[in-house]
Image (spheres, rainbow, N blue to C red):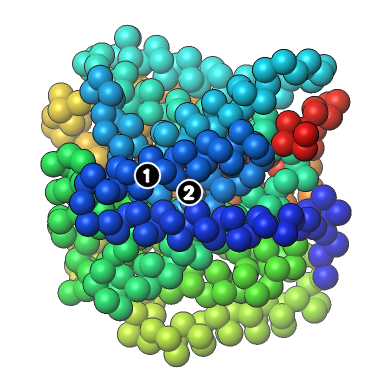
Amino acid sequence: MIAAPDVHQVARRPDEPAQGVAYLVALVAVINLPTLGLLRAGLSLIAFALLVTGLRDLKALLIVLFALMPVRAGALSLGAVGGFELTFNRVCVIVALLCYLWHRLGQRRPAKAGEPMLWVIAVLVVIDILAVFLGDGAIGASAKRVTSEVIEVFLFAVLCYRGLSEDDFPRVIQAFALGSLVLCLAAVGERATGVNVLFRFPATTELYAQLQEVTVGLERADLMRVRGSFQNPVYLSGFLPLVAFAATYLLLVVRRRALGGVLLLLLGIVAILSLSRTAMYGVAVFAAPVLIWWLSQDPARRVLNGALLLAGVVGALYLLAPEDLGRALDMARNPYSEEFGGGDTQHRIELITTGVPLILGLNPFGVGFDESAIETTSLVSPDVANFYVGYGLVNGIVFVVWFCVLLGYMLYRLLARHRDVDWLLAALVLSVAATYLSFAEYWITFPAVLAFVLVSRERFTVREHDPSAA
């Protein structure tokens, strides 16, 4: 068996699971309120409760945010200020920032060695900001997009790094697993009843209302694909490697076999219900290196255990959803068949070979994020237009190159450590990067990936005073 380091044994306070579940139940209930006024009032009350929690205990707030991450739809909004949409995701990060600043006031900051990864992230943020002014797009539209990226992706990750320690990592993953469990159960219920309890809230804008009603792209093989709390099944599929990481971490590292096993089974069900190529190769890219690493620990015994585990999962999927499993296997054998919507879709390699020359021929700081950007790229093909705009490649080749540098540096730091959790995180980075080739925008999964990597790092620094322990 894997010898788990002491710091990754789940040490939790008695009220932590109950607190996370309470927030999850409250958010799901608020999402299903009948009017826009009630929705905004409910979200405001949750935000206020988060603020109170964070002022008392910053770590508890950040851990709750990880629990809410899988179920809080990006379209949930409290309104707009000066044309900038105050989505619930952004409000959560702003609340966390206020609580962090509150705890830092009046405290003497101890000496702390710099984290090189934060400098790599800072350069990426600078390039992101420069793209607003040096790119070809309208400054207003580009500024809104960059502001949301900086808040939801990079600021959130830095706050997690500052507010959480390596010892908190098991609690973070347990909270994220609870939220993922609710997401998977909601997706299964969506297929069974046709009701998506995570994406049926009163919309604040006409665009969000259209997203709730649209069915184009949701139907495949004469079935409605599940999407959970996301705008479309591809985004849900791109999120599934994060769920796979949480399940395997609980199973293999901290030995929470009940929660990890149930989550792993539900993950398989949701993957086949999504009928998505992204889910297929995203989870496969994660599972392959994890399986190789796991078998290498004790190959003689674990080959049999692995075969039994695989047979158990596939057998359970066959008993619970035999027809869906059959369709998923057919799609795996022939992913670009007409039946599964692949007849008119460009192969991912073709997207790269066509899209990269397009990027190199345009402004190195991007064409912006507006209608003109879509029109410019659609001159080649609609798929390339989606590829270019959907990935954040609108920021240009300079941003893309440095983003790849960040991914490579993360992998280097993880593989250099050789801890069990680092092998799992390296597989997660690879699988999430693979999903970016399927229109799964990086801001959906990258906040969690970046936060997981930063929080799990060993700190070669003086331990800071924990503001929540006072």
- Identify the residue at image location x=66%, y=39%: 57
Corner quadrant of residue 252: bottom right
Q: Observer-nearest residue: 282 or 164?
A: 164
Q: Nearer the viewer, residue 51 or 279?
A: 51
Alpha-carbon span between mark 2 and mark 1: 14 Å
What label does residue 69 carry, if any? 2
- Residue 294 appears in view: no
Q: Which mark is residue 43?
A: 1
| Mark whose residue sits in front, 2 or 1 | 1
353 vs 463: above or below:
below
- Against 222, residue 40 (above or below) is above
The kind of residue on which mark 1 rests is Leu
Q: Position of residue 43 (x, y in %)?
A: 37, 44
Describe residue 254's horizontal placement relative to residue 454 as left or right: right
Viewport quadrant of the N terminus: bottom right
N-term-proximal mark, 2 vs 1? 1
Disc 1 secondary structure class: helix
Asked where in the image residue 354 lies, by quadrant, the reply is top left
Name the spot of residue 30 as percent of width and height, x first: 35, 54
In the image, residue 413 lies at what x, y percent? 71, 36
Extreme top residue here?
133
Name the amino acid, label 2. Answer: Met
